[in-house]
Amino acid sequence: MSSPRAACPPAALLWLLALVGAAQRASAQADPFAPGVRWTQAPAPGAPALPRAAALAADDNAGLGAWSGAHPGFSAGSAHALGSADPFAREAAAPGATGSSGIAAGAGPWIYMLSQVPAPDAWSRRTRVEGATVDAAASAGALVPAWVRETAFAANGPARIAVEASGASAWFAAFDDGARRVRVERLAGADGAVLAARDLDAVGLQELAVAADGSRVALAAGLDLFVLDGQGATVHQAALTATTTALSLSGDGHVLVHGVTGGLARRVQVGASYTVAPGVAAGPGELAVRAALDAAGATLAIGWWHAPTGVAWRFEVHDLVLATRVVERVFGGAPGGLQDLPTAVALTPDGRRAAFTCWSGATGAPELAIWDRASDAWVVEADLPGSAFALALDATGTRALVAAKSAHANVLSATGELVLVDTGERDLQVLGPAQTGGVLHLAARQSGATAVLFLFGDPAPAPFRVPGVAGRLHLQRAGLGVQRVLAGPDGRADLVLPLPLDPAAIGSVRHAQAAFRGPGGTTLGATLVRVRIL
């Protein structure tokens, strides 16, 4: 990493101030190794809005939001922010935008923003998808679209958007109530090119799900279920017994779950078609409203809502290989109280962690909770100021971005916030945005450590063991950089590195891991962080 030149005092002074500021923030912030809220993001001053969707982008370095209400729009901010945080980019939706809104992203830098615009009024809307990148947004300080795709028809119907795991392409669907059909398109993140398109006869649109590898997309469209391949060809079609918002695909799209009357159905692809496999039965009066599969299609999370009362619901996770339920939480409230509803369920790709969000209310349920299968423990439960509408869970299950209202969903309120919750379990944390001209602030902790070696380098193809060292190294040994910092009594050490004020550095990635030295030798930490400079 380059150092400031002695002949350039202004830059050196700026870096010194940044280092001092980082140290002050570190002393004032909450413990990064304890569970809790890391940051919140409110609407722009004087422009109240409700966050309706949330996404993590660019290897979970950016937190994104889609906002509705009086001032609809989109936001992008650092996922490593602290406290009350402003995004590095905002973009207002098109004038008069109403109806469906959404935002989607994957591991890459691409951002997909969905809105509906009057054509010419709120009852005749065109669905619009705009594309941007995290890096361009950080550089410009705005989510200026690089491309726009808009449906040719105007209709009074909902729209949905979902993305493959890499983020390189996204599928969106829009319902045309006049023609009684659903338009489905697959768009390239780089330029908005239409990679696939279909028109499906249907009487509605409830949900859209995309396989992680992009090879399958499923739609719950009124009383019809469709599964298309990556080119838009129909792989499977079936009649539904009821409309449903519970829909999910495995990573390769070969396992599908969807809500039905009396339960959740499961279908498995065998050859060229899907066959029915054992599903999960609902309890009395329950509807499956949310579902999620892990990458292998072996673990299933379900959010059940008790429709007759509206104040009770249930969360459960099933091991589909062992055909057994591995965890269950039941929430119930007094009849007539504030409604409760599971709004999202999520699983990490490996199925080791599960999460849910809900409205809470009469049940007193936490608006967000994350469960760990190995320990059978709820590693974090967050009571937020208001109902949660949407959830984005990172791949490790240690961080969750939530779109939440400022009050309960049944209570009048025109504003809300994005909330980033961290379980505090990672042994290496990034504290604060890593921006050009700022600093990269890392903190590492292990009980009993007397010193911490901060390691920097290129990621190894697979973690490997180093002779005489406990744990596994996630970085290549060739070109490995090391910075040693003495640890405090609690085994924590902080490293603050200046980042050059260089626009060309935006989008570059630093990989880091910690190694801990103590009386028993050296232990490599379990966390590899990928820090994108924004």
Image: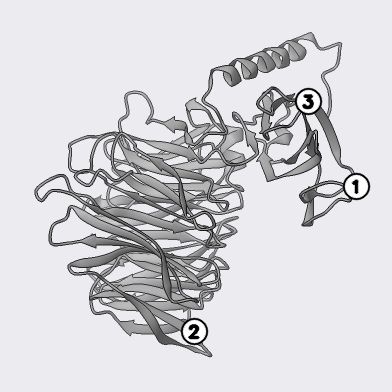
Tell me: 240 left or right of 474.
left
Q: In the structure shown, which secondary structural element does the residue marked by tag 3 occupy?
A: strand
Amino acid at pointer 1: Ala
- Is 200 above or below relative to 288? below
Amino acid at pointer 2: Gln
The first of marks 2 and 1 along the sequence is 2
- Is 13 above or below relative to 179? above
Q: Which residue is mark 3?
A: 485
Among all residues in the image, which is located at the extreme front? Answer: 519
Quadrant in the rendering for residue 487: top right
Q: Do labels 2 and 1 touch, CB within 8 Å? A: no
Q: Which residue is mark 2?
A: 269
The first of marks 2 and 3 along the sequence is 2
Amino acid at pointer 3: Val
Q: Which residue is drawn at the image coordinates 77% and 13% (left, top)?
A: 12
> Quick one: quadrant of the N terminus?
top right
Q: CA distance from mark 2 to mark 3?
A: 53 Å
Q: Position of residue 523 (x, y in %)?
A: 77, 42
In the image, 145 versus 496, the foreground residue is 496
Q: In the structure shown, which secondary structural element does the residue marked by tag 2 occupy?
A: strand
Q: Which residue is mark 1?
A: 478
In the image, 45 versus 273, the foreground residue is 273
Q: Position of residue 296 (x, y in %)?
A: 55, 71
Q: In the structure shown, which secondary structural element does the residue marked by tag 1 occupy?
A: loop
Q: Do labels 3 and 1 touch, CB within 8 Å? A: no
> Within 10 angstroms of label 1, few (less than 14), some, or many (20 or more) residues?
few
